[in-house]
């Protein structure tokens, strides 16, 4: 727990430190969003461009702290708490990378989001696959469909296969960094495919569970 808190605090501190150091050198209007072709298509005022992501990181960290405490099935979360805390740190690191890319871009270093995003997303998806393969039934973390939430057996089956699929999606996302003009597709399409398949799989797994129960 101490290591988790220390790492989280360090990442939050780095995000705010980067903003404070860069702030005097940022333009009054900050580029903040890129389209699928890697072209800037969104802007923010200087303050929000510098501090929005760090503030979001604080909010996300507080939310992740609260989830194991407020979930009605919090005893299940305790069974994979170590993996959950590691994911929290990785998520903060992911946001720090995005914050750094935005900041450096506005300082004149044109680091393409179409390279940064597929690499950072790929790392996140791969670990997410590990996390959900370890996750036990709860209301906040994992593939939460009416069918997985209704049965521990369906939950375990769905998360075992979806864990592998998220790892595959992460690998495909990493490949997207080699093809920057198509990076968005390498991130989005595998993610949508995994979501569709796991939701569908959980439904049919539940129907099989009902048949076995009735039989």
Image (cartoon, grey):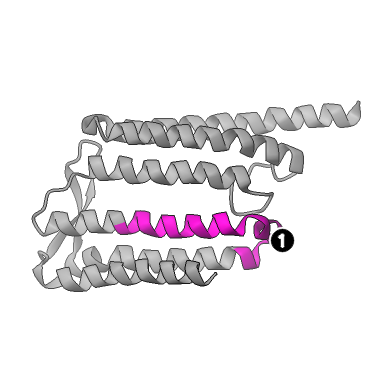
Specify whether 154 is left or right of 126. Answer: right
Question: Which of the 4 image quarters holds residue 199?
Answer: top right
Question: Which of the 4 image quarters holds residue 95?
Answer: bottom left
List the single residue furthest toward the front: 3
Return the x and y of residue 28 as percentages of the image width and height. Answer: 11, 66
Question: Which of the 4 image quarters holds residue 185?
Answer: top left
User: Which is more toward the observer, 8 or 19?
Assistant: 8
Return the x and y of residue 110 as percentages of the image width and height. Answer: 12, 48
| Residue 74 is a magenta residue | yes
Locate the C terminus by quadrant: top right
Dominant secondary structure (helix, strand or loop) of the stretch shown in magenta: helix
Specify whether 213 is left or right of 192. Answer: right
On screen, 145 above or below 214?
Answer: below
User: Which is more toward the observer, 35 or 172?
Assistant: 172
Q: Which residues are magenta?
A: 68-96
On screen, 201 above or below 43?
Answer: above
Q: Secondary structure at mark 1?
A: helix
Specify whether 159 is left or right of 152. Answer: left
How would you rate the neighbour count of disc 1 (Cα within 10 Å): few for under 14, some for 14-19, many for 20 or more? some
Q: Residue at x 42, y 55 (%)?
A: 91
Asked if residue 73 shows in the view, the reply is yes
Return the x and y of residue 20 as percentages of the image width and height. Answer: 20, 74
Q: Residue at x 44, y 42 (%)?
A: 125
Q: Residue at x 60, y 54 (%)?
A: 140
Return the x and y of residue 198 as percentages of the image width and height. Answer: 59, 33
User: Which is more toward the observer, 18 or 193?
Assistant: 18
The residue labelled by disc 1 is 75
């Amino acid at each position: 727990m101490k290591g988790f808190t220390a790492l989280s605090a360090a990442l939050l501190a780095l995000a705010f430190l980067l903003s404070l150091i860069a702030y005097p050198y940022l333009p009054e209007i900050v580029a903040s969003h890129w389209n699928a072709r890697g072209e800037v298509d969104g802007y923010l005022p200087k303050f929000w461009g510098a501090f929005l992501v760090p503030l979001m990181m604080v909010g996300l960290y507080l939310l992740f702290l609260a989830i194991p405490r407020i979930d009605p099935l919090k005893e299940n979360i305790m069974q994979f708490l170590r993996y959950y805390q590691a994911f929290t740190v990785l998520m903060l690191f992911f946001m720090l990378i995005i914050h750094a890319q935005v900041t450096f871009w506005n300082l004149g270093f044109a680091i393409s989001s179409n390279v940064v995003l597929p690499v950072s997303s790929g790392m996140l998806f791969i670990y997410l696959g590990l996390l959900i393969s370890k996750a036990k039934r709860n209301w906040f973390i994992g593939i939460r469909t009416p069918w997985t939430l209704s049965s521990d057996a369906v939950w375990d089956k769905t998360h075992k296969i979806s864990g592998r699929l998220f790892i595959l999606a992460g690998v495909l996302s990493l490949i997207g960094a080699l093809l920057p003009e198509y990076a968005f597709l390498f991130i989005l399409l595998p993610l949508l495919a995994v979501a569709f398949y796991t939701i569908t799989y959980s439904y049919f797994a539940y129907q099989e569970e009902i048949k076995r129960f009735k039989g």
